[in-house]
Amino acid sequence: MNKKCAAVCIFVLVFLMLPMAYAMNGRDVFEKVQAVRNSKLDQKVDATMMLFDKGGGKRTRTLTMYGKDASPEAYKILIVFNSPADLKGVGFLLHAHTFADRDLWAYFPEYKRIRRIPATSQDDSFFGSDFSYDDLSGPPDLDDYSFKILREEEMIDNKPCYVIEVTPKKPRKYTKYITWVAKNLWIPTKVEYYRDKELYRSGTFKNIRVIDGIPTPFEMEMANFKTRHRTILTIQYINYNTKYPNDLFTQKTLERGAK
Amino acid sequence: MKKVLIIVCLLLVFASAGFAEDFFSTSGRLELRGVLPLQETDTEPEYPSLLGILKVDTTHPTWRFHMWLEGGWDGSVDLPVEDHGFIKGWDKVYQSITPFLDFKEIYGSYANDFLEFRAGIQRFSWGKLDEYPINDLLNPWDYSQFLIKSLENRKIGVPSLSARLNKDDWSAELAWVPILVPYRLPLWTERWSVYPGIITMTKDYNAEIINQEPDLENRSLEDSSVGLRIQNSGTVDWGITLFHGYDLHPVFKTSEGGIYYEDDKVIVYPGALPDFHKMSSFGMDAAFVRGDWSIRAEAAYAIGRYFNTKYELWGYPANPSLGTFELNPNMHKSDSIAYGIGVDYRLFEDCLLIMQAQQTMITDRPDTLYDRKYETILWAHLRNNFMNQKIETNLNMAWNPEHGDTMMKADLWYVFTDSWKTGIAAVSFDGPSQSLFGRYSQNDQVELDVVFSW
């Protein structure tokens, strides 16, 4: 009886200690981040983008973003600017066949023409903001990066975070990213973008609320240290699980401003 | 005028479903513009312009109303010598822009998942190339201040019906323009007049030149134009276009001209009337991305186009005197093949290089034509933004190697706020007097703009 009791206790102890023995690596953390990102592919977002220049000047843009989980392909995104007048109707369409293979189009009402954008432009400024096309283009292909945990218990906004160095395997504008991933929420709360050793821009993700079980930052700020320009993207409205039809993500609706 | 108002009322009724949703938007733009010509010419003086644009859109998902109204006082020409309508119409080639009101677009549309139907005044945008898209044939152009205006600004909205069918990656669009809508030309006395030679001929007389209009009174449904476009989007976006209708390139038909002394002034009838001819065109276009390059191409075979002979063969008298003069026949009919390729290449962030090469081949060319058998245009456009798009600069260059004529345009815009911006632009032309760019070689200018938009 005593032997049996001891065996059961040892088994329970080993079972309980197993997770502790398994330490997460950087890739594991980003797999969880990716799972959260994938859970919010179906969405509609109304947002305000405020651009601040170093002299204090401010410009405001409003936009609507539609997203769709496009299984068996990866996802589709349509972004349309609602204001200011010069940008009204300007749109951006993305079809991600896989997380690594994307087709991009932009539409400019002034020219009434749709232009294809090379995927290699993904790190360029998104319509003058400090965000890049890539920042607003859905989840990346994790196989294109390597991950390394630098620290495990750093606090950002009173949230314990993994600090992870992310290095692109292919040449990109930024040679590495330092990302703070909130434990248990599995979303980045801060990202620093480096070119070689130089810090180029930094993004912070605040006012995190849980919508339909998905942690969502309602305020994203991207600051460029080179130009001393920064952009704040504030979500006004968000709805997940929208299940839009494929017809919304076509060149026709891009031309019609998603109408 | 009445017809336009009736159309507006009908479209508003159709769009009432959209208004019932209490969901429509307006936006607009006011532009104050001043031009400084860099060469002295005998053309009419120019004054600052004030132009306005008003756009109205409903956002009902099924029914939609859209209006793009443009108007103002364009000071690029003095008051016209004839009476002109305030609202630009579809029955005159020469129309005043001091002042003017122009419905660039006004249409109602119904759309569901598969079909979109539009009725009203529309501007279409078919094909892939910039500046001279080969398959974009449904809208005639306004040639006043030609080459200063963007392609979309040149297009004249046409009354039309269109239906677009969408299925997955495919779409088919059928467009019908029930009447002949003439292209518009600057008045003979304007700086942007296509054939300023007439001015030289008559300047010693201090003459008034009559802008002779073609007779468009008897237009019927037989004068309609129709176009069909089928597109597929994917890794390569491609399309085919069929068009049967009026050629948008202007040609003149010569007849009898004259110089007369009437009411204490000299009156000149140039004797060259704008002419219109139907043609058929079959075209293809494609766009795709390879690495850092965004590539697009177009080609079309056009049947039955008309071309003018060299200006000196028209038969204008070398030493004009009072009386009538007969002009020589000046037109030739031929098929043509046009093709072109354009590429976008991002040199660095916010700096885009756009290049385009296109060529037109006249299959049956006599020596009397000014156009060569092959006419080539090479374009380069460098667009650069600074300070997160607070400053935008554009440098455009174009070259026609057959005649050696060139155009250079440069502009710089500064965005003060979301509503205010200002810009300065300069343009220079060089080349023989009948070549595409050289005909404007007296039109070098600097332009200042202040824009308010809401």
Image: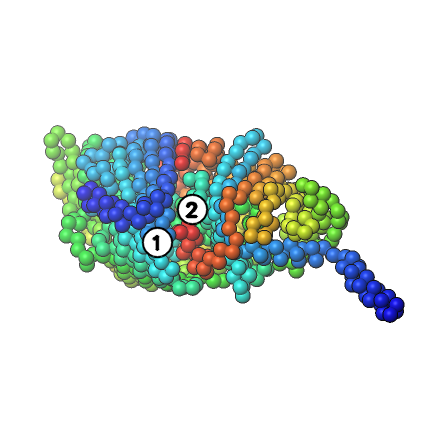
The residue beneath circle 2 is A89
Amino acid carrying label 1: it is Thr
Mark 2 lies on a secondary structure that is loop
Which residue appears at 45% of the width and 39% of the height?
Answer: A84
Q: Quadrant of the N terminus of chain B?
A: top left
Residue B73 image offset from top left, x and y in percent: 29, 33
Q: Residues within 10 Å of mark 1 (few under 14, many from 20)?
A: some
Query: Cβ–Cβ below 8 Å for labels 2 and 1?
Result: no
Chain of the residue where label 1 is placed in the rendered structure:
B
- Return the mark for residue B62: 1
Furthest residue toward left: B263
Element type where label 1 sits in the image: loop
Residue at 23% of width from left, 37% of height from top?
A: B86
The front one of B220 and B296 is: B220
Mark 2, Cα crowd under 10 Å, few <14 / some 14-19 / many 20+, is many
Residue A240 in view, yes or no = yes
Q: Looking at the image, which is closer to me, A103 or B442?
A: A103
Decide if residue A104 is on the left or right side of residue B67: right
Residue nearer the viewer, B22 or B45:
B22
Res A251 → quadrant: bottom left
Q: Name the quadrant containing residue B178.
A: bottom left
Tell me what residue is drawn at x 33 percent, y 48 percent: B18
Q: Residue B279's quadrant in the figure?
A: bottom left
Q: Which of labels 2 and 1 is toward the front? A: 1
- Residue at figure coordinates x 13%, y 37% from the top left: B260
Measure how far apart labels 2 and 1 are at the Cα level.
18 Å
Front-lying residue, B367 or B105: B105
x, y percent for residue B216: 17, 49
Residue kind at label 2, given as amino acid type: Gly
Q: Chain of mark 2?
A: A
